[in-house]
Amino acid sequence: MNLHAVRTDADLVVTVHGHLVVGTRRLLHDAVAPLVAQGVRRVVIDFHDTPYIDSTGLATLATLARLLGEQGGSLRSVGMVAELRARCAVAKLDGVMTHYPSIRRALDQDVAGDGPGIDPDVDA
């Protein structure tokens, strides 16, 4: 897995290429957590090129959502296929992370957003 991250003000967009699993999850955590400490409040993770997330990857997303929530921020996702969204729902991540149809839509919402879950414009 590799990442591409772009930061603007209080926003961070991270594109994940490859599987988010036990051997790669730390890359995502280490790319995002320090920036949350520096003031990033909205993190959008683009999963268009992520075919699989294991339980440790899901736990990493939960940790990042918690860190952001403690700072008044939010974790958002785009590009998840239905199978990955279902895994997130089973792991109760849909309660702490909102899925959007596009990066632009994820960034257009206020930091508080519409609340966790699936943006109504996303095909479930």
Image (cartoon, rainbow, N blue to C red):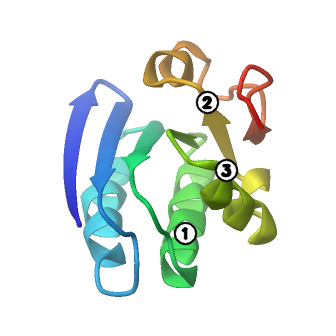
Give the residue number, with chain letter if any, for mark 2. 100
Calculate the distance from the C-alpha at mark 2 to the C-alpha at mark 3.
13 Å
Calculate the distance from the C-alpha at mark 3 to the C-alpha at mark 1.
22 Å
Check the picture and name the quadrant holding the C terminus: top right
Which comes sooner in the sequence, label 2 or label 1?
1
| Extreme-bottom residue of the structure | 22
Q: Is residue 110 above or below residue 61?
A: above
Residue at x 36% of width, y 69% of height: 19
Q: Residue 8: percent from the left, percent from the top?
A: 26, 24
- Which mark is in front, 3 or 1? 3
Residue 32: image quadrant is: bottom left
Q: Is residue 75 above or below residue 65?
A: above
Which comes sooner in the sequence, label 2 or label 3?
3
Numbered mark located on residue 63 in the image: 1
Check the picture and name the quadrant holding the N terminus: bottom left
Label 3, residues with CA under 10 Å away: few <14, some 14-19, many ≥20:
few
Give the residue number, with chain letter if any, for mark 3. 82
Residue at x 22% of width, y 34% of height: 6
Query: What is the three-letter code of the residue carrying label 1?
Result: Thr
Q: Secondary structure at mark 3?
A: helix
Residue at x 37% of width, y 30% of height: 11
Q: Secondary structure at mark 1?
A: helix
Work out whether residue 92 can be spotted. Answer: yes
Q: Residue 119: percent from the left, percent from the top?
A: 74, 28
